[in-house]
Image: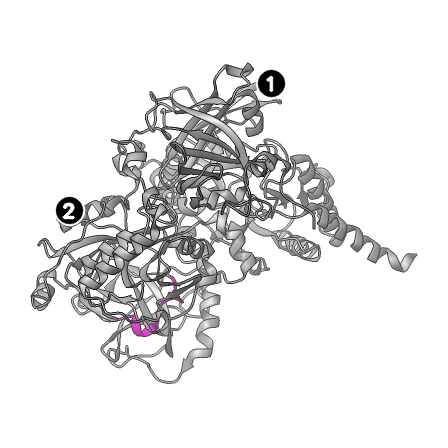
């Protein structure tokens, strides 16, 4: 058998005996790039080990006092032998008389990137490594500087936090001593058995019965809607996360995740499964929420949709890096063979806080204990979905209960679809959906919703409604009369946003957001919209008083960010200035669009240089390109200095990493944003190759036909491909490259693919760039591949009438009915509020170019066979 372990690990292996230590020896894990880990290690002396993934191994430094978040504090970091990638997950106790004997925990882990364009190995060689860490505890920029400067050859380095970044009130190492994987401290890792014994004793003292609570037979406890938060001390308050509710069971190595619909979703979230297996407790059943966090660190259901529907292992694997998820657990139903459901809530939460890390892929969902109205106001200001108020003494019951109240910052609810109306005007298929809610066992009509649909969604809904048609209304009360109504079996659930409830139980200004396949129709209940906490409290006075329960503030989920000063904010200007005269769209409308679309747009912008085109007076005024960031840009604005061969000088490019930075460039009057295909620090290795279908002089129907030919050619070569409108009159077809190849290699492959497309449809496609030589054909442009070459970023607005947007599409939408002008700053946010981004996989794993070229040769041979 071939030993695949990197030769850099020879020193590591010589120091360890695989028969005497549980440490990994390498060879079984392939790196994805950008992994970092910090382990706390109680060897001869307590220290921290910083490890950065480079060249297939973990480059490692021992930091005796641990990393400091204070820029003025310089910490010694001694470079040690390279470690295998598997070591990033290692926790345990290295036995006595072995090298490094002692307990080890994963104190923090996450992703990192170079803070400068230079290659990381080159930085390492010259003794100055500048990185940005994105962990659960450490976030920001650090420098590793070898003592002795560039000529230094020793192992001693200094680890220094970059100045000018927010500094927490206390050292992170002191505030968060527990592992982000197992949730244990070093002392607990040495004797985890004693910890389990102590917790079992506590459960016996609380009177928790010894019996199994099978996850597949357990229902969810649901909250009752309310309009205001209670103020008395009998309640505690949690953030209402915008994610997918799950019951999570760990039984030994077996992990099961069950959604509200009863569907097992374990295979969709492998990082959650791995994190649950790392806990110190083998038998646990918890209630929580799987979330995807946006640039602000806030849960976003819109982002999560890119993961919710994936079931094929390959699709899930590709999505892991694009949309990472976390699980926040807020209740514990069973633990170590004990049934906790009849214990008071704060006793259950105390147990949960004991077994889960406060930070990590799987973490404890904290709470606050007082001043619910102020907490709700803070949640509203932070643009969260809302809060949940819970009676401290409440037991866990598998039904909706007044002991839990959900107070939303905005009205959003799931409704049962019971029918539809005839189409009106230019709309096809149907006009509006009829909505209802269950009241007891009756389905009661509430309202209809006729906005929020686009063409593809109408077609999807129509396909779902067809098999459910019936002759009579499914509503037991309130069925609308008159003509033009059609009825369906009440099996579909639609999520709808609205402004308020009406006095007669209807809703005002509803907007359709999407179908929810994780919610059962029977769970869409008619609740009194004005439920008051005091009424609920009166009904619960007979329940036992609460006992103990405490945790860090849920307002920040226990995150080290809570001590940081407020994030920078852009001072918006001239919001009423009209940018699109015909439509009356203003600069404020442009900024509002970029605010709304930021969650799905930012993954394409982060770490990439961008080029702006600014229209300070709108599309009818003068415009200019801007690559260089001005000297007066605020200090928090990220720029990267990159040498340009064309101008023979350095250019300070803007880099948009978060929503506030996106707002900053929009406030400058930027309409379109053009983006590089490669990221910092790997600017020579693009994440995609692109074929730009340019129709100048050709009808758009020919663009569609050429795009379909591109799709056929790529499918034949077993190449994944993704399509978007350019925002103007063309289409862009992108193929994921995964940062594996150079610009020259991807450009060469793009040229070969363009040639195959032209050969497939020679009557309508050309490789001729000059307009005069195109003869009315669609130009298949492969020239946008290369260092510094840009395309209109996905979701970028274009400076054209109607305010069109460069919009990701499903290939099924690329037909003769495709109209790019339908995708505008008005329609695109609604479109992606209820569906996943079909372009997202282009940021995932890349293609195997050698295999593609082999398939090309094979296809040529097949075509040449008849002539031989």
**Is residue 225 among the parts visible in the rendering?**
no
Magenta stretch holds residue 517: yes
Residue range corresponding to the magenta coloring: 514-525
For the point 10% across and 61% down, which residue is it?
545
Q: Quadrant of residue 713?
A: bottom right
Taking depth in this image into account, of 646 and 279 the one nearest to the observer is: 279
Magenta stretch holds residue 722: no
Indicate which disc, 1 or 2, sits on the residue closer to the N terminus.
2
To which residue does mark 1 refer?
A: 648
**Is residue 157 among the parts visible in the rendering?**
yes
Above or below, 162 against 387 in this view is above
To which residue does mark 2 refer?
A: 374
Residue that sits furthest to the front in the current view = 97
Give the side of residue 455 with respect to residue 677, left or right: left
Above or below, 374 against 115 in this view is below
Residue count near mark 1 (Cα–Cα under 10 Å), binned few <14, some 14–19, many ≥20: few
Above or below, 417 against 12 in this view is below
Q: Quadrant of residue 563?
A: top left
Residue that sits furthest to the bottom in the current view = 471
For the point 30% across and 37% down, which residue is it?
561
Spatial separation of the CA atoms under disc 1 and disc 2: 56 Å
């Amino acid at each position: 058998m071939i030993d695949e372990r990197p030769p850099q690990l020879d020193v590591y292996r010589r120091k360890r005996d695989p028969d005497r230590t549980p440490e990994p020896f390498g060879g079984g894990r392939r790196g994805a790039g950008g992994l970092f880990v910090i382990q706390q290690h109680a060897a001869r002396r307590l220290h921290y080990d910083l490890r950065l993934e480079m060249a297939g191994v973990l480059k490692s430094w021992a930091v005796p006092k641990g990393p400091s978040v204070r820029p003025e504090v310089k910490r010694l970091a001694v470079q040690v032998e390279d470690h295998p990638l598997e070591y990033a997950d290692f926790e345990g106790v290295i036995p006595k008389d072995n090298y490094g004997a002692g307990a080890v925990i994963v104190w923090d882990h996450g992703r990192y990137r170079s803070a400068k364009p230079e290659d990381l190995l080159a930085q390492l060689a010259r003794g100055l490594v500048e990185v940005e860490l994105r962990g659960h505890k450490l976030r920001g920029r650090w420098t590793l500087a070898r003592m002795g400067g560039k000529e230094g050859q020793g192992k001693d380095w200094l680890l220094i936090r970059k100045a000018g970044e927010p500094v927490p009130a206390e050292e992170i190492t002191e505030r968060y001593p527990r592992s982000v994987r197992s949730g244990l401290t070093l002392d607990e890792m040495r004797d985890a058995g004693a910890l389990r014994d102590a917790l079992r004793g506590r459960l016996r003292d609380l009177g928790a019965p010894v019996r199994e609570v099978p996850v597949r037979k357990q229902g969810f406890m649901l909250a009752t809607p309310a309009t205001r938060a209670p103020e008395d001390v009998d309640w505690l308050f949690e953030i209402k996360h915008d994610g997918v509710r799950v019951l999570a069971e760990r039984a030994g190595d077996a992990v099961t995740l069950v959604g509200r619909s009863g569907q097992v979703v374990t295979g969709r979230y492998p990082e959650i499964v791995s994190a649950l297996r790392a806990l110190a407790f083998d038998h646990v059943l918890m209630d929580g929420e799987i979330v995807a966090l946006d640039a602000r660190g806030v849960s976003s259901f819109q982002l999560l949709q890119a993961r919710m529907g994936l079931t094929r292992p390959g699709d899930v694997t590709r999505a892991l890096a694009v949309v990472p998820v976390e699980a926040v657990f807020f209740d514990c139903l069973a633990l170590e063979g004990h049934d906790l459901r009849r214990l008071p809530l704060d006793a259950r939460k105390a147990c949960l806080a004991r077994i889960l890390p406060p930070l990590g892929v799987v973490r404890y969902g904290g709470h606050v204990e007082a001043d619910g109205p102020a907490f709700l106001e803070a949640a509203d200001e932070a643009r969260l979905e809302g809060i949940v108020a819970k009676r401290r003494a409440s037991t866990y019951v598998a039904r909706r209960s007044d002991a839990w109240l959900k107070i939303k910052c905005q009205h959003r609810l799931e409704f049962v679809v019971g029918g539809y109306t005839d189409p009106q005007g230019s709309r096809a298929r149907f006009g509006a959906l009829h909505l209802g809610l269950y009241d007891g066992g009756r389905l009661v009509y509430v309202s209809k919703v006729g906005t929020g649909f686009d063409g593809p969604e109408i077609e999807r809904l129509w396909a779902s409604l067809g098999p459910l048609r019936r002759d009579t209304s499914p509503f037991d009360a309130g069925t609308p009369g008159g003509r033009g109504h059609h009825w369906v079996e009440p099996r579909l659930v639609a999520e709808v946003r609205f402004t308020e409830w009406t006095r007669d139980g209807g809703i005002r200004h509803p907007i359709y957001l999407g179908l929810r396949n994780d919610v059962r129709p029977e769970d869409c209940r008619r609740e009194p919209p004005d439920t008051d906490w005091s009424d609920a409290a009166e009904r619960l006075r007979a329940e036992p008083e609460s006992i103990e329960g405490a945790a860090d503030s849920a307002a920040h989920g226990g995150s080290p960010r809570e001590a940081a000063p407020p994030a920078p904010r852009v001072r918006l200007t001239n919001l009423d200035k009209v940018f699109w005269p015909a439509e009356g769209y203003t600069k404020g409308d442009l900024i509002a669009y970029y605010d709304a679309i930021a969650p799905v747009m930012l993954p394409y912008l982060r770490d990439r240089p961008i080029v702006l085109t600014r229209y300070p007076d709108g599309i009818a005024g003068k415009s200019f390109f801007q690559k260089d960031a001005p000297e007066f840009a605020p200090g928090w604005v990220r720029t990267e200095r990159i040498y340009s061969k064309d101008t023979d000088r350095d250019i300070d490019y803007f880099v948009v990493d978060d929503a506030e930075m996106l707002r900053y460039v929009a406030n400058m009057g930027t309409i379109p944003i053009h983006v590089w295909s490669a990221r910092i620090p790997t600017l020579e290795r693009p994440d995609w190759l692109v074929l730009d279908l340019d129709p100048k002089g050709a009808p758009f129907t020919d663009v569609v036909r050429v795009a379909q030919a591109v799709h056929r050619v790529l499918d034949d070569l077993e190449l994944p491909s993704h399509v978007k409108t350019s925002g103007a009159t063309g289409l862009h077809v992108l193929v994921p490259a995964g940062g594996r190849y150079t610009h020259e290699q991807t450009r060469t492959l793009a040229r070969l693919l363009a040639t195959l497309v032209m050969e497939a449809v020679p009557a309508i496609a050309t490789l001729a760039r000059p307009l005069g030589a195109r003869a009315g054909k669609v130009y298949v442009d492969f020239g946008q591949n290369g260092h510094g070459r840009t395309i209109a970023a996905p979701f970028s607005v274009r400076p054209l009438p109607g305010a069109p947007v460069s919009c990701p599409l499903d290939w099924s939408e690329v037909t003769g009915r495709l109209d790019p002008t339908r995708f505008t700053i008005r329609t695109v946010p609604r479109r992606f509020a209820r569906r996943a981004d079909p372009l997202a996989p282009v940021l995932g794993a890349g293609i195997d170019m050698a295999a593609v070229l082999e398939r090309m040769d094979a296809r040529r041979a097949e075509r040449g066979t008849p002539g031989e």
